[in-house]
Amino acid sequence: MHTTSLRHRTTKTVRKGSYYPLGASLTPEGVNFALYSKHATEVFLLLFDRAEGEPTDVMQLQHRTKFIWHVCVTGLQVGQLYGYKVRGEYRPERGLRFNEAKLLLDPYAKAVTGKFRNVDNLLLAYDPQPGAGERLPDSRDNTTIVPKAIVVDDPSDHYIANPRSTVVLLAQKAGFARRSGVIDFIGAGRRGPDTMRTRVQRCLTTAQRRSMISTRKAPAEPPDNLQGT
């Protein structure tokens, strides 16, 4: 199986970008990417033209604010497919299962190209052979079979060019909705696809969502109590 080479190769203009917001966000220049990983040693952004194709660009992220790796790629537009590969320790006994042969889906992706299919156990980070357990990483590359994240134009995204001086705060949507009379009741704590977030967003127009935005001075650094990989 072909293995995607993890080396920086791109003809696109790459800028430092911002650690906020997490995920992929449209900017006036292109798309800002931000990924949280506390224990990663290297992070690579992979761009794709086709869901099952090889990457057209591989970009090593050079900037990290606390534990958030970030980059802004100019010229990218809505519909761009992408994923990540991350280097770090493989120590399952400590909960660390970094494996650069495995493509990772952005946990903040708003759309994906399809469902996960564990063909030949290629989604597993560890060697699936009987008796191997989790001790050995699986070196087989799964780049072509993993669904890709899709850059979308989400009106609720509010990219801030300089998050150190300004941070966006969203008001509590439930309280706002009740006070404004948009909806009569929100089922707080409900599970499933009809969650509080989706129910409120269906009711609020883009203009109403924007009216919920307020700003304040941000701390010099992100909070120290971030948890994750």
Image (cartoon, helix red, strand yellow):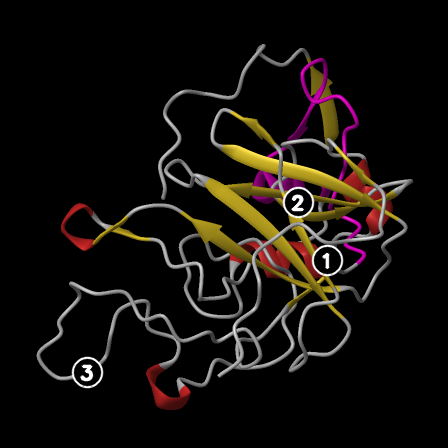
Question: Upstream in the sequence, badge 2 or badge 1?
Answer: 2
10 Å neighbourhood of mark 1: few (<14), some, or many (≥20)?
Answer: few
| Rendering quarter of residue 58 | bottom right
The Cα–Cα distance between marks 2 and 1, rounded to whole angstroms, is 8 Å
The residue drawn where x is 43% and y is 49% is: 87
Q: Which mark is residue 129?
A: 3
Q: Amino acid at mark 2?
A: Ala
Q: Are marks 2 and 1 in contact (CB under 8 Å)?
A: yes
**84 with respect to 110 (left or right):** left
**26 with respect to 106 (left or right):** right
Q: Are marks 3 and 2 in contact (CB under 8 Å)?
A: no
The Cα–Cα distance between marks 3 and 2, rounded to whole angstroms, is 53 Å
**Placement of 52 over or under 56, stated as above or below:** below
Query: Which residue is denoted by mark 2 in the rendering?
Result: 177
Q: Amino acid at mark 3?
A: Gln
What secondary structure is found at the residue carrying circle 3?
Answer: loop
Expressed as whole percent of the image width and height from the top left, the position of residue 219 reads 57, 11
Q: Are marks 3 and 1 in contact (CB under 8 Å)?
A: no
Expressed as whole percent of the image width and height from the top left, the position of residue 23 reads 62, 48
Magenta-colored span: 153-180
**40 with respect to 60 (left or right):** left
Q: Amino acid at mark 1?
A: Cys
The residue drawn where x is 73% and y is 24% is: 214
Expressed as whole percent of the image width and height from the top left, the position of residue 179 reads 66, 38
**Placement of 155 over or under 219, stated as above or below:** below
